[in-house]
Amino acid sequence: MSTNTAGKFEQMNSHTTNNDELIAIELEIVEIDDQINRLRHQRSCLIKRKQQLKVTIEQYQPRTTGNGNEHWQRTDFPWNSKIDEMRTEIFKIDSFRPWQLETINVTLSSHDCILIMPTGGGKSLCYQLPAVISEGITIVVSPLLSLVEDQMYALRKLNIDARSLNTSTPRNEQTEILQILDGRNSSVSTLKILYLTPEKISKNKSIMAKLQKLYETNRFSRLIIDEVHCVSQFGHDFRPDYKYLSIFKRQFPKIPILGLTATATLKVIDDIRNILKIPHCVLFRAPFNRKNLFYEVYHKSSVGKNTLKDLVNCIQNQFDKQSGIVYCLSQKDVEDVCFELQQNNIKAGCYHAGLSATARTQIHEKWLESKVHVICATIAFGMGIDKPDVRFVIHHSISKSIENFYQESGRAGRDDQQSHCILFFRFTDVFRLAPMAFADKSGNGLQNLYSMISYCLNESQCRRKLISKYFDEVWQSNDCNQMCDICRRSSTSITQRNCREEALILIACLNENKKERLTAIKLIEKLSIKTMVKLDLQRLILQLIVEQYLKEDFHFTSYATTCYLKPGPRAEYIKNEKCQILLDIVENAKRPTLTTNKKRAKQIVDKKPSTTTVTEDRPKLQMVTNTEPVVRPIRRKRRILEYEDDEDDDGNDAKNIPILKKANTSSNDNMDAF
Ligand SMILES: Nc1ncnc2c1ncn2[C@@H]1O[C@H](COP(=O)(O)OP(=O)(O)OP(=O)(O)O)[C@@H](O)[C@H]1O
């Protein structure tokens, strides 16, 4: 070998060695990055667990107060015989549900308290009963007038003097209420509960002055904050006006605060305590598990017409003539679904923010009286729905968060009878919702949506377990009692597959088409991955987004927002052979479809769990003759639910109720109150 050739050979050799070393270093860096990520994740899990343990300790060991160790479940407080008497005589309730007595004891002991209890659990009694036996007036901050009206209606039936100060309060009644707060008329007043909206308090300074008077004259019993999760911007319904309530503890230090909500994660609870300045409040958290609710996720057809057919079949086969709600993503969807149900002789009505308040009230009332069986609604049909016999809640599209889903589906089965929470899940719905999640004021919209996507993609873990994890609850494996599709299904139909190869192809395709930009649908069209059926490929894309191997790339125009895909922050790691992308794969033949509904309905009834009440004789399938005229709902221009500013002076606050306004966008695919 000549020296020249040998030199070249050496050079090539060293070039190869350098290249090899470079690749090895790059891989090592990727591995280190991944370890850092894993450690960060582990750290945040540990912090979360630490908080969880702190909360659990607080929850189960009543805190030491100035009065010594008090056990809130005791029945020898001075007021216990009185509350028992009022419970049976006025409220006609035989016994307390879990955490009701404890909460009442805490608030009557003048301690601050937060009660987290599932929807329908009986939170109202926890302040209404103390209000009745207390000397002064209980102020209740509640976010929605419809909610307040329902509560007042129920209280009046019990002969309890409850009033509300809002736009629809007649002028003379407003004056009378303000005089009572002022101390005038107070000797003859029987007023026990006064409902206010957060807007009323934050924007109407004179109200605070009246409350000051109430406080100074020792007639301010306690402050109740209903839907207290609205205080926190980490919660799913953040309302800026709720933040103003932080002033209460400073202004009225002796007044006990009781916050009520159906859902709050540990982060939200911490935030609420900080904002309301009640760090030492007693926290009660009733188990989130509603044993009578059967959770299931159905694959939703990519063809709209088929989805509607499936929905009709589902309602006719499983829930004939029974009360239910179908939640839809947009007003247009609500109207389309409602029309289809009506066409199939199902008594259905629409509810969304594009309808007049009168139309909404009318349909709500008809549904309460069971003259209409199914309400098709956006999430505008929300808080305060107190119909006991709702047998099903169907989500026609994915919810924006687990909290929303839990609360919306929780409107089923308030009477403790078995009821169903069904979610129709489809790939493309995620990309309709993602731009709105991205634009969500809280900044957590996408993260919330990802939790919801994971819930839907899951094919191997109990649905309740996932919900409990989300709410930081300790989960016992037999708590579900086969009341979800996953626990009911045979585990042999599921395999977990490492889809790293397919994921690499997806990422490479995005890198090759950077200029063109690809939406998720376009990406699938470009590829021909033979190792996977389309449905699983769609699921893989969603999982890669959730796990940050892929990322959305939002492009906004004045008419629409397009969600493209690009490689995500973890995309590089996928090159490492150690990386695993595990996807649950269901054998297609065993994937639940809606065409088998009739059989499934029978299976569910036949295989009823031991601890839940089940309606033995499910009505047989028969067509309903609809007495209501079948009218194609008129499509309205896009409208959104908005709140106007409140006035500053007594009375004329014609602005604190939700009013409907035309939005300045032409799209009619309107999502209510997102
Ligand atoms: N101890 C009890 N025994 C029997 N029924 C009860 C008891 N407590 C409350 N209820 C009833 O349960 C129903 C639901 O109560 P409530 O409206 O207070 O629920 P909630 O927790 O406020 O629900 P939401 O979060 O949906 O507002 C009501 O009809 C109420 O009368």
Image: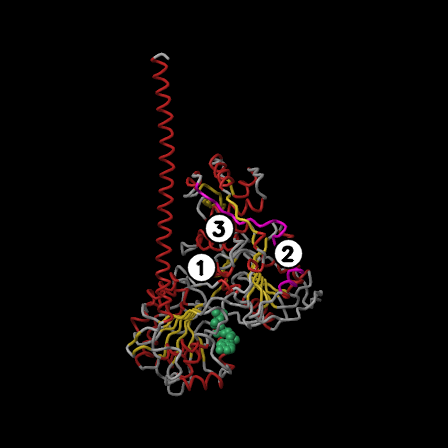
610 w.r.t. 138: above or below? above
Mark-to-mark CA distance, 3 and 1: 20 Å
Asked whether the viewer can see residue 553, the reply is no
Question: Which residue is located at x 40 percent, y 87 percent?
Answer: 188
70 w.r.t. 3: above or below? below
* Mark 3 / mark 1, whichever is N-terminal: 3
Mark-to-mark CA distance, 1 and 2: 28 Å
Q: Position of residue 489 (x, y in %)?
A: 58, 57
* Mark 1 / mark 2, whichever is N-terminal: 1
Q: Position of residue 431 (x, y in %)?
A: 51, 49
- Residue 129 within the magenta-colored segment of the rendering: no
> Which of the numbered marks, if any, corresponds to residue 594?
2
> Could you tell me which secondary element the residue under label 1 belongs to?
helix
Range of magenta residues: 578-604
Task: Tell whether circle 1 marks a residue whose Cβ is less than 8 angstroms from ligand 1.
Answer: no
- Please state which amino acid type lies under the numbered disc 1: Tyr
Image position of 134 (left or right of 493): left
List the residue tagged with mark 1.
470
Q: Position of residue 367 (x, y in %)?
A: 60, 69
Q: How is the image coloured?
A: secondary structure
> Which of the numbered marks, if any, corresponds to residue 434?
3
Q: Residues within 10 Å of mark 1 (few under 14, many from 20)?
A: some
**Placement of the N terminus among the 4 image quadrants:** top left
Question: Which residue is located at x 35 percent, y 13 percent?
Answer: 4
Asked if the residue under mark 1 is in contact with the one under mark 3, i.e. CB atoms within 8 Å, the reply is: no
Image position of 589 (left or right of 511): right
Mark-to-mark CA distance, 2 and 3: 26 Å
Image position of 70 (left or right of 358): left
Question: Which residue is located at x 31 percent, y 71 percent?
Answer: 249
Report the residue that reaches farthest toward the front: 1
